[in-house]
Image (cartoon, helix red, strand yellow):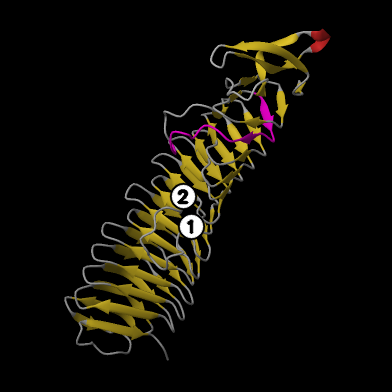
Amino acid sequence: MKRHLNTCYRLVWNHITGAFVVASELARARGKRGGVAVALSLAAVTSLPVLAADIVVHPGETVNGGTLVNHDNQFVSGTADGVTVSTGLELGPDSDDNTGGQQIARGGTARNTTVTANGLQDVMAGGSATDTVISAGGGQNLRGQAYGTVLNGGEQWIHAGGSASGTVINQSGYQTIKHGGQATGTIVNTGAEGGPESENVSSGQMVGGTAESTTINKNGRQVIWSSGMARDTLIYAGGDQTVHGEAHNTRLEGGNQYVHKYGLALNTVINEGGWQVIKEGGTTAHTTINQKGKLQVNAGGKASDVTQNTGGALVTSTAATVTGTNRLGAFSVLAGKADNVVLGKWRTSGCAERTHSH
């Protein structure tokens, strides 16, 4: 059943304001008013504040348009299309103490929602949201599914059991994947505006669960927490990935990857302009260095089964552990000694740079 708003009005005494307010209701067939679902706003006869509206969208019903403000609450078991949400986050981001906003229940669907400052879209388990746009100060809470969310400074929190597909994170936007949550096909355009590995954790993608097939563009950043895993990440010039957990199958197309203590990177491919840095206590295995790519292994770092192709650079320390193959065959840097490493000399600083070339 398709529902249209503002088709019936009645005066209601507001005990808080001490005045009558006009409550718009949904008209049903044969002149019967909807007994449960109230429209998306209440208009006061006076300029005094009014009570918030509670709206229920039942299974099989559709609501088009409307705005939620001043702790209004919309509970969607049917379909809500084109709603603007400007309430629900007054008590802070991702807080269970918040009331108001749009709640998408099991079987419910929200489409083309606009979430503005202080607005919250809460997608419960079994619910879904498609093509939501979230501005700065607004947020989307996921225990269900979201498709095609755009974060224009807004935030998305993916809890255990929740999933997001095709999220785009623009400047100052923030996606948090908590343990048990998953994001697929995220495009990250923010987080690294302060430069490579700058101390900036207020935007970009934070991975405590699982991130699949992420694309990190210029100024984009993905931070993998100790509990997190990222697979099949593509990083372009000006973007970077910080690894405290696990990163699998990362491809550096001019971007950077930083593997910290206890972090693990597997099957990284470093192409032209790409740079993989293994810090003290960090580990990488099966890295491939192609022409004009660079692998740097700091003291206390470990890189095993490295493939160094023609034109690929290896920068390492006497206190690092590096093994792999180059055009001469197997090579190693162990206990301060280099064996079969192509070109270069040990520096007095204890570092060596080796470029594999003809």
Quick one: 105 or 259, which is closer to the camera?
105
* Residue type, label 2: Ala
Q: Is residue 132 left or right of residue 340?
A: right
Q: Which residues are magenta?
A: 78-94
Q: Quadrant of residue 87?
A: top right
Q: Is residue 136 above or below residue 326?
A: above
* Residue type, label 1: Asp
Q: Is residue 205 above or below residue 160?
A: below
Quick one: 304 or 111, which is closer to the camera?
111
Give how far across and how far down residue 247 sits, in percent: 39, 57
Pointer 2: what residue?
Answer: 211
Pointer 1: what residue?
Answer: 232
**Does the magenta stretch mainly form a helix, a strand or a loop?**
loop
The residue sitting at 42% across, 79% down in the picture is: 309
Mark 1 touching mark 2, by CB under 8 A? no
Label 1 environment density (alpha carbons within 10 Å; few <14, some 14–19, many ≥20): some
Specify whether residue 118 is painted magenta: no
Q: Is residue 311 left or right of residue 37?
A: left
